[in-house]
């Protein structure tokens, strides 16, 4: 959506936003469901690998794929493939150590990383409201991370590492990938990520086949929902609305993730995790509102 676009959202966009929020809230739930079945390295590889096969079959049948796009932008795809692969392994590892609700709350710190990239890399000035939001995010992250127990702290570090890797990928895509046709961008993004996940799995010594037909079924569903449908909606929404609105809407994701975590695994954040999460979400809301105002002025 351009800066001059109307502030009201169409019914189509509203429906897509609602679907995006609900599906996005299942990302760490899927990872948590796979944790008892396979190592994070193996499950992440199979999820992205199966998503690659499904996308390849679909786009290939429509004759949309062009190998020259991959060759022409080789370093771009290798860069984002490494970053997304590393982010995926870190998030899958995190939910094997801490509950999905706490991990989802802490992952909203991505707003702070995005602001830092905008300031240091894109040389954009930050408003007072954005700085206030960043401060709230930092306080919230410290509140969540410094809870009792080494497992909690290690799990929090994996979440933060995942956020940093994924935020760098977003910055690179915004700067170098937006003019690329979507079908080829999306397929080669998933393909390059799968290749790096295969490398990570092999190097880590965690190569293994899914242990049961149920594992295969869960992996296929995760690849279809959490990779293909989720990211299609994510990028579709990102290209059609202001970043501030997009950011504000995604603050609802941790709330739903906590509900799914309680219903499915009987796991919930501690009071300290909830307090830190509230601070992080408030920071995200402040930043999102500030970006919305800036977009209207521009």
Image (cartoon, rainbow, N blue to C red):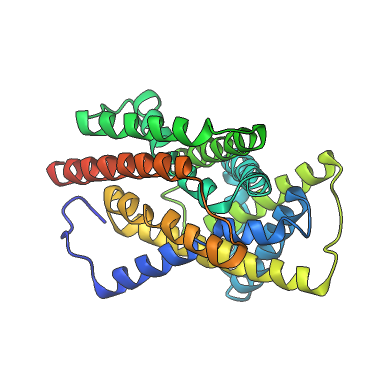
Q: Quadrant of the N terminus?
A: bottom left
- Residue found at x 51% / y 41%: 169
Q: Nearer the viewer, residue 185 or 54?
A: 54
Say above or below: 145 vs 257: above
Quadrant position of residue 139: top left
Left or right of 250 on screen, residue 84: right
Left or right of 32 on screen, residue 233: left
Say above or below: 2 vs 132: below
Q: Nearer the viewer, residue 10 or 63?
A: 10
> Is residue 170 in sight in this rendering?
no
- Residue found at x 57% / y 40%: 159
Q: Position of residue 149 (x, y in %)?
A: 63, 33
- Residue found at x 61% / y 50%: 70
Left or right of 16 on screen, residue 205: right
Q: Position of residue 293 (x, y in %)?
A: 17, 44
Q: Position of residue 207 (x, y in %)?
A: 86, 50
Q: Nearer the viewer, residue 77 or 87?
A: 87
- Residue found at x 65% / y 57%: 32
Q: Please, which residue is most extreme toward the left here? A: 297
Q: Nearer the viewer, residue 90 or 104?
A: 104
Q: Quadrant of the C terminus?
A: top left
């Amino acid at each position: 959506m351009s800066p001059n676009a109307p502030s009201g959202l169409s019914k189509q966009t509203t429906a897509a936003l609602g679907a995006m929020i609900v599906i996005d809230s299942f990302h760490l739930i899927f990872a948590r469901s796979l944790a008892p079945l396979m190592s994070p390295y193996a499950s992440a590889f199979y999820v992205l690998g199966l998503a690659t096969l499904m996308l390849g079959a679909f786009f290939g049948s429509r004759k949309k794929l062009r190998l020259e796009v991959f060759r022409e932008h080789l370093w771009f795809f290798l860069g984002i493939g490494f970053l997304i692969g590393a982010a995926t392994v870190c998030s899958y590892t995190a939910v094997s150590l801490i509950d999905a609700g706490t991990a989802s709350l802490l992952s909203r710190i991505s707003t702070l990383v995005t602001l830092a990239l905008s300031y240091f890399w894109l040389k954009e000035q930050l408003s007072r409201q954005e700085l206030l939001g960043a401060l709230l995010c930092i306080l919230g992250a410290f509140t969540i991370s410094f809870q009792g127990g080494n497992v909690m702290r290690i799990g929090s570090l994996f979440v933060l590492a995942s956020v940093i890797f994924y935020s760098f990928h977003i910055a690179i895509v915004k700067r170098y990938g937006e003019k690329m046709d979507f079908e080829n961008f999306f397929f080669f993004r998933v393909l390059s990520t799968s290749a790096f996940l295969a490398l990570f799995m092999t190097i880590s010594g965690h190569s293994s086949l899914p242990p049961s037909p149920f594992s295969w079924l869960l992996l296929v569903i995760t690849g279809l929902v959490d990779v293909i449908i989720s990211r299609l909606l994510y990028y579709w929404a990102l290209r059609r609305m202001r970043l501030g609105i997009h950011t504000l809407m995604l603050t609802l994701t941790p709330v739903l993730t906590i509900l799914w975590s309680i219903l499915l695994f009987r796991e919930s954040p501690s009071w300290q995790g909830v307090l830190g999460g509230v601070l992080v979400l408030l920071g995200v809301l402040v930043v999102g509102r500030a970006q919305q105002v800036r977009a209207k002025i521009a």
